[in-house]
Image (cartoon, rainbow, N blue to C red):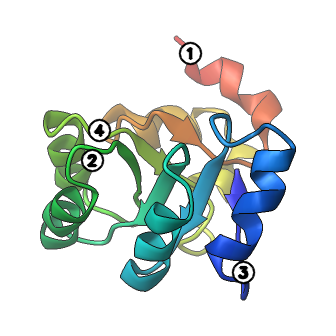
């Protein structure tokens, strides 16, 4: 995952290409302007965009046209948004870390079932976590 901060994607693209990583990178973006700049910077990049609503999910679907993208759905996103992304064929990423003391990632240190409960109605393709060793307990 490549989290570009305060640098235009066009400046990072040549570095990624020279490392032969363009087809292996997931570029994180958090607003429409940066997402559009990332789209223009490299045709091979897989790009993740922060999506907070159904309207944004649909708008990004239009912006990306036929190009696949990953919807980054924040922890507090409703389960219906995860379901809509899945229905639209859009892969999802969630961090499960934001949202206060009851966020699944904070709970995972003491409660291995926290991820299972969180992911039960929020099917995510990618999960960012600080407690990866707790994930096997979620597999069942």
Distance from the alpha carbon under mark 1 to that under mark 2: 19 Å
Residue 55: x percent and y percent? 12, 71
Name the mark on residue 121.
Answer: 4
| Residue nearest the observer in this picture, 105 or 74 | 74
Residue 84: x percent and y percent? 15, 46
Residue 79 is at least partly visible in this image:
yes
Query: Regarding mark 4 in the picture, which secondary structure is present there?
Result: loop
Please identify, in this view, whether the residue under mark 2 or under mark 3 is nearer the observer: 3
Going from N to C along the chain, the mark reached first, 4 or 3, is 3
Name the mark on residue 139.
Answer: 1
Distance from the alpha carbon under mark 4 to that under mark 3: 31 Å
Query: Against 83, is 135 above or below?
Result: above
Query: Regarding mark 2 in the picture, which secondary structure is present there?
Result: helix
Name the mark on residue 30.
Answer: none
Distance from the alpha carbon under mark 2 to that under mark 3: 26 Å
User: Residue 133 is drawn in which quadrant?
Assistant: top right
| Residue nearest the observer in this picture, 132 or 84 | 84
**Is the C-beta separation of discs 2 and 4 under 8 Å?**
yes
Going from N to C along the chain, the mark reached first, 2 or 4, is 2
Relative placement, left or right, of 85 versus 42 is left
Residue 30: x percent and y percent? 49, 76
Residue at 73 percent of width and 83 percent of height? 7
Query: Regarding mark 3 in the picture, which secondary structure is present there?
Result: loop
Find disc 2 in the rendering and name its residue: 82
């Amino acid at each position: 995952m490549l989290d570009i901060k305060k640098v235009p994607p066009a400046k990072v693209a040549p570095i990624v290409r020279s490392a032969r990583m363009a087809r292996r990178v997931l570029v994180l973006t958090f607003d429409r302007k940066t997402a559009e700049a990332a789209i223009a910077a490299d045709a091979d990049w897989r790009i993740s965009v922060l999506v907070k609503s159904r309207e944004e999910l649909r708008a990004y679907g239009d912006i990306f046209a036929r190009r696949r993208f990953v919807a980054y759905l924040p922890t507090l996103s409703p389960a219906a948004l995860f379901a809509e992304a899945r229905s639209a064929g859009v892969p999802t990423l969630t961090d499960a870390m934001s949202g206060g003391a009851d966020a699944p990632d904070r709970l995972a240190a003491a409660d291995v079932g926290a991820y299972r409960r969180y992911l039960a109605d929020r099917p995510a393709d990618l999960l960012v976590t600080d407690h990866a060793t707790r994930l096997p307990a979620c597999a069942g």
